[in-house]
Amino acid sequence: MKVYAASAAAALFGASSFAAFAPSLPSVARAPSSSSSATVAAPSSASALSMADDKVFDQGAYITESKEMRLKYLEEQAMFALKIAVENYGNAVFPNALIAGDVVITHLLHRMGYLKDGRAKVMCVDTFHLFPETMDFLREIEEHYGFKAELFCAEGCPVGDKDAYDAKYGANLWKEDIEQYDKVCKVEPFQRGLKTLETDCMINGRTRWQGFERAWIDQFENAPIGGGLAKCNPIAYWTLEDTFDYIAKYEVPHHPLHAKGYPSIGDAKDTIPIPEDGSTRFVDFKFEGDPTPWLDYASERKGRFVGLANKDGSTKTECGIHVAGAEQTFDRNLWEEGAVKSIASNDEALEIIKGDGEAVVAVYAPWCQFCQGMEDEFAKYAESAGVPVYKFRGDEEREFVQEYLNTESFPTVNFVKSDGSVVKYDSEARSADDFANFVKSFEKSTA
């Protein structure tokens, strides 16, 4: 069987390369046969197993060549996926986070000519909390590869204007409500970017090696955008070691913070080196220190989202962009038809609050998945509410809704009493019956 395996391997990989590390085997007798197949006599076990002789078998050379074979295959596989993504779709877009896998994809898109001819667009989301090195690095690779990324940030803020963001959303939004921060600074700009660029295939750098949440992804998936946006994950089957091997082989420009101990780079506020002392680094295309803390399974993103927790108390591992349904975009507002009335201005909202009637006001943001989730039930409630039911877009008037409509996050539903007081519906149960019971509770209190 060893002779057969050697022959098969030589056929698959090329006789010359295989011969460089194949063990020497004795000549074998072949029985005459009229058939096309040959019967191979078993070789002497003593000579066939003499693999420890370093003159016969160079284990280091074998491992190096095997890794090179693997990297070549992964590269071809990734390029084939990118070819399908770009050439089979009209508007392939690559949201680039500038982490290790993403710089590999950038390099491949460049090699294939898709950046130069504009057939693949690159977009980046500036959260206003990135490391300064990140935006500097973006400009560096734009110049290196000859492309210009499309930048998106929190709605209503000029790109790069952190003061405008702080004034509109608050500098401490991420401390006050991390889910709201993710929606404002990551999910909504991400969705808006895909929509603006008319994306029909989204290229991204997720891999199975990154953790259990991503362990079953394939190179192509469908995301629920516009009825079936394709997702291309060209390096889905790569390990992080493969990624850095590739960066080293082609001297791919990569984020400068890898040299300071960061295996993955996100927001500066919650990203740390791994290990925390920065003893593992990737400098001049090679590792310094023990690379194991970076390269173990599910370790790439260990330094991300540090100290953050989801509302249910679980450890935060995703920013919200790649969780189920987060890719959905809307070409419309919420409650465009039906019994829910729109409040068009702050003055109109004050008239309702200071008037002598009762009303229900939902403060919302159209990009918020929780607002989207309650749309049907709130519309159903409005049809038979018995009081006027309004919607007011609060993400564009944050200071006003904080002051007058109890709003720190979306959605916030309020009951406006006839005396002008505004009472917040303080529950996450959002069925039509839940809203009705909330309003009925005020009837009892005044009876």
Image: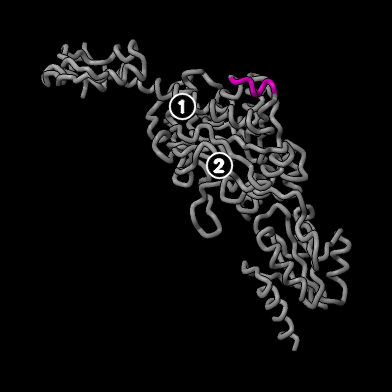
Q: What residue type is labelled 1?
A: Leu
- Residue 69 position within the rendered picture, expressed as x and y whole percent measured from the top left: 40, 21
Q: Indicate whether residue 84 is drawn in magenta.
A: no
**Residue under circle 2?**
221
- Residue 150 position within the rendered picture, expressed as x and y whole percent measured from the top left: 71, 32
Bin the neighbour count of mark 2 within 10 Å (Cα to Cα): few under 14, some 14-19, many 20 and up: some
Read off the magenta span. Answer: 112-117
Q: Which amino acid does label 2 sit on?
A: Glu
Q: Is residue 366 left or right of residue 286?
A: right
Q: Earlier in the sequence, mark 1 or mark 2?
A: 1
Image coloring type: one colour
Q: In which quarter of the image is residue 51?
A: top left
Above/below status of 216 relative to 58:
below
**Residue under circle 1?**
74
- Quadrant containing the N terminus is top left
Q: Which residue is drawn at 71% across and 70% down?
A: 424
- Asked if residue 38 shows in the view, the reply is yes
Q: Quadrant of residue 419?
A: bottom right
Q: Residue at x 14, y 21 (%)?
A: 42
Bin the neighbour count of mark 1 within 10 Å (Cα to Cα): few under 14, some 14-19, many 20 and up: many
Q: Do the residues labelled 1 and 2 touch (CB within 8 Å)?
A: no
- Asked if residue 172 shows in the view, the reply is no
Check residue 239 in the rendering and tell me which mark sits there, or answer none: none
Viewer-nearest of labels 1 and 2? 2
Dot 2 lies on which element?
Answer: strand
Determine the residue located farthest toward the bottom in the rendered image.
447
| Label total for image | 2
Which SS type dominates the magenta stretch? loop
- Quadrant containing the C terminus is bottom right
Distance from Cα at disc 1 to Cα at disc 2: 19 Å
